[in-house]
C-alpha cells in the first residue's frame, strides 16, 4: 500500500498497548498521530510482572525516573531467577543476569573452571557471580564501579496494572489520544483487505493507516479479521494453562523471581513492594484446573488476597506478525510461557523493530518480509532456550518430566547442547536475547557437564590457575559486606 502512514491506531490498553503507544510517540514524535483504543468492559490479562534487563533501555529511552517508576509500580529489583526442583527435586540453581568470573581473551571463564575440576560440582559456578551472591543474601545496591567484573545487571518486578497506568499517563502527556470503548466490527478495504477503521459498539469509527493489534490472545485484527494463522509449538512446550493469584507481601523482599518445578508444571513467585505475584503454569492433561488451583494455594508463603484466575494459552507464534497493515504486538503475536520473563521484552523489541522499519511512505513487501523474518528468529531463539529447561532434567517423579526428556527437540537446540556437552563450547547466535552466560548457567544448572574443556585453558600453570580463581572469588565477594538488604535499598531509594 504505497500510501503515507500518518495515523497509527493501537487496539488494546494492556502492557503491549501502552508500551507501544509510549515508545512510538516518543521515537516518532510529530511524524505520526497515535490513538489507542481500550475496553474497560474486556479488561487486560492482568499478569506479567517479571522482566529482563532490556527493560531498563526502554525506561531510559522514555526518560522515566527510576525511583519514581519503582514507586508508581510497586516495583522491586530482579537480579536472577532461582530454579528450584528443575534438574531434580531438592536441587536449585540461579540463572542470574550477571556473568561468572571475568571475561578472558578468547577463552570463556568456564573452561578454566572445568580444568580446575569445579564444573562437576553444580554449585561452584555461582561463587564467582556477584548477582547470584547478592541474590542469595537478599541484597541490592546500584554499584558504580569502574571494573566491569563488578557489574550487577538487573531488571524489575512490577505490578503490571500499575505499569500500564503509569505508561498511560506518560503517553497521554506526549499527545497519545486514548479512546475507551469496545470494538464491535472491523472495516476492511474491499480491494486489498487492508483495515480501514474500527467501529465501536456505540457507532464511533476509529480510522487509521496502520494498526497495532494489542488485543491480547484474541488477536482481533491479526487473526479474527485477517486469519493469519498460528504455528503451534505445544508439542515442545506442553503447558497450556496458568492459574494466578496475589498474596500478602513477605517480610523480606527477595531480589529474584522463584521458579519452582512441580510434577506437571511450575510455580512462580514474584516479590513486589505491596504484595506477591504467584502462579502455576501447568499441563491440563496432568492437573485439572481445580487441582492446579489447590496446588498453588497450598504452596503460597503468605495469605492469598485475590481470587485465583485460570488463563488458557497455546504456545506458538503467528505465522506473520505483520500482515497487510496490521502488526501484532504482545499476546496477539504469539505466546511463550513466562519461564524466562520474556514476553514484555518481546513487546519492546517488536516496537523497536517497527520503528526501525516504519513505513512512513507506505507499506511494501520487503519491509514486511524483513520484519517477519526478524520476529520469527527472535521467537524461535527464545523458544529453544525455554525448551532447554524442560528437556534436560533428571526428575523421575512423573511422566510429564520423562516425556520432556524423551521428546525430540528443535535441531537448533540439539546442536547447541551437543557442542556444549563435548568440551563446553558456547556461541551466542546473532541477535539471540540470551548471552553465553545465560546458556551456561541453565545448561550446568540442569545437569549438563561438558566432557572436556578448551586447551586454551592450559595456558597457565596449575598454581597460577588456583591463584587466579581464588583472586576472582575474593573480588566478587568483596562488595557484598557494603551492600544493603534489598528492602533497605528500596526504602532509601524510593522513599
Ligand atoms: C500466566 C502468564 C504469566 C505471564 N508472566 C509474565 C512475566 O512474568 N513477564 C513477562 O514479561 N510477561 C509475562 N506474561 C505475558 C504478559 O502478561 C503479556 O505479554 C502482557 O501482559 C501483554 O498483554 P497484552 O497487552 O498483549 O494483552 P492484554 O493484557 O490481554 O490486553 C488486551 C487489551 O486489548 C483490549 N481489547 C481486546 N479486545 C478489544 C475490543 N474488542 N475492543 C477494545 N479493546 C479490546 C483489552 O481491553 C485490553 O486493553 C505472562 C502471561 C501469562 C498468560
Image (cartoon, rainbow, N blue to C red):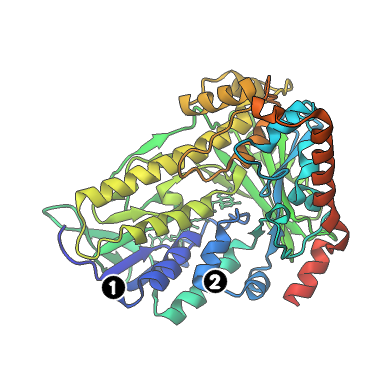
Residues at marks 2 and 1, CA–CA distance in whole angstroms: 24 Å
The x and y percentages for residue 13 are 46, 65
Residue at the spot of label 2: 165
- Callout in the foreground (2, 1): 2
When asked about the image quadrant of residue 211, the answer is: bottom left
The x and y percentages for residue 440 are 65, 35
Q: Quadrant of the N terminus?
A: bottom left
Q: In screen coordinates, is 374 left or right of 136?
A: left
Q: Residue at x 75, y 46 (%)?
A: 129
Q: Is residue 445 visible?
A: no
When asked about the image quadrant of residue 261, the answer is: top right
When asked about the image quadrant of residue 275, the answer is: bottom right
Q: Is residue 154 visible?
A: yes
Residue at the spot of label 1: 204
Answer above or below: position of 426 versus 43.
above
Q: Is the CB–ligand 1 distance for label 1 below 8 Å?
A: no
Answer above or below: position of 297 versus 73.
above
Q: Which residue is at the front of the view, 493 or 326?
A: 493
> How would you rate the neighbour count of disc 2 (Cα within 10 Å): few for under 14, some for 14-19, many for 20 or more?
some
* Mark carried by residue 115: none
Amino acid at each position: 500500500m504505497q500510501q503515507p502512514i500518518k495515523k497509527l491506531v493501537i487496539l488494546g490498553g494492556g502492557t503491549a498497548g501502552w508500551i507501544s503507544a509510549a515508545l512510538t510517540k516518543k521515537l516518532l514524535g510529530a511524524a505520526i498521530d497515535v490513538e489507542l483504543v481500550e475496553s474497560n468492559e474486556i479488561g487486560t490479562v492482568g499478569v506479567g510482572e517479571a522482566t529482563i534487563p532490556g527493560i531498563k533501555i526502554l525506561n531510559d529511552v522514555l526518560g522515566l525516573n527510576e525511583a519514581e517508576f519503582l514507586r508508581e509500580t510497586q516495583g522491586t529489583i530482579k537480579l536472577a531467577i532461582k530454579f528450584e526442583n528443575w534438574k531434580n527435586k531438592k536441587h536449585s540453581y540461579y540463572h542470574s543476569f550477571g556473568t561468572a568470573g571475568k571475561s578472558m581473551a578468547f577463552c570463556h571463564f568456564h573452561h578454566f573452571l572445568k580444568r580446575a575440576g569445579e564444573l562437576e560440582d553444580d554449585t561452584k559456578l555461582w561463587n564467582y557471580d556477584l548477582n547470584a551472591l547478592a541474590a542469595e543474601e537478599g541484597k541490592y545496591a546500584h554499584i558504580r564501579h569502574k571494573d566491569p567484573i563488578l557489574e550487577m545487571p538487573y531488571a524489575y518486578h512490577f505490578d503490571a496494572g500499575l505499569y500500564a497506568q503509569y505508561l498511560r499517563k506518560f503517553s497521554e502527556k506526549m499527545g497519545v489520544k486514548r479512546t475507551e470503548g469496545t470494538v464491535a466490527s472491523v472495516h476492511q478495504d474491499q480491494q486489498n483487505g487492508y483495515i480501514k477503521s474500527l467501529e465501536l459498539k456505540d457507532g464511533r469509527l476509529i480510522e487509521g493507516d496502520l494498526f497495532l493489534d494489542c488485543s491480547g490472545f484474541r488477536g482481533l485484527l491479526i487473526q479474527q479479521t485477517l486469519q493469519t494463522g498460528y504455528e503451534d509449538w505445544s508439542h515442545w512446550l506442553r503447558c497450556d494453562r496458568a492459574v494466578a493469584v496475589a498474596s500478602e507481601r513477605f517480610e523480606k523482599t527477595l531480589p529474584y523471581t522463584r521458579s519452582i518445578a512441580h510434577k506437571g508444571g511450575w510455580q512462580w513467585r514474584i516479590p513486589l513492594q505491596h504484595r506477591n505475584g504467584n502462579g502455576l503454569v501447568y499441563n491440563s492433561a496432568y492437573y485439572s484446573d481445580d487441582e492446579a488451583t489447590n496446588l498453588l494455594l497450598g504452596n503460597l508463603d503468605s495469605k492469598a488476597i485475590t481470587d485465583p484466575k485460570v488463563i488458557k494459552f497455546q504456545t506458538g507464534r503467528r505465522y506473520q506478525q505483520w500482515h497487510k497493515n496490521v502488526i501484532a504486538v504482545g499476546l496477539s503475536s504469539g505466546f511463550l510461557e513466562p519461564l524466562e520473563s520474556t514476553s514484555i521484552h518481546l513487546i519492546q523489541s517488536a516496537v523497536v523493530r517497527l520503528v526501525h522499519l516504519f513505513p512512513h511512505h507506505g507499506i511494501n513487501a520487503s519491509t514486511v518480509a524483513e520484519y517477519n523474518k526478524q520476529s520469527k528468529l527472535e521467537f524461535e531463539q527464545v523458544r529453544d532456550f525455554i525448551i532447554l529447561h524442560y528437556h534436560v532434567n533428571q526428575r523421575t517423579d512423573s511422566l510429564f518430566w520423562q516425556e520432556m526428556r524423551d521428546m525430540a527437540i528443535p535441531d537448533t537446540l540439539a546442536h547447541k547442547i551437543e557442542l556444549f556437552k563435548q568440551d563446553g563450547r558456547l556461541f551466542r547466535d546473532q541477535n539471540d536475547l540470551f548471552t553465553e552466560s545465560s546458556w551456561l548457567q541453565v545448561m550446568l544448572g540442569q545437569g549438563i557437564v561438558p566432557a572436556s574443556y578448551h586447551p586454551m585453558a592450559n595456558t597457565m600453570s596449575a598454581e597460577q590457575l588456583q591463584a587466579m580463581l581464588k583472586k576472582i572469588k575474593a573480588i566478587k565477594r568483596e562488595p557484598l559486606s557494603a551492600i544493603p538488604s534489598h528492602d533497605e535499598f528500596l526504602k532509601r531509594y524510593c522513599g
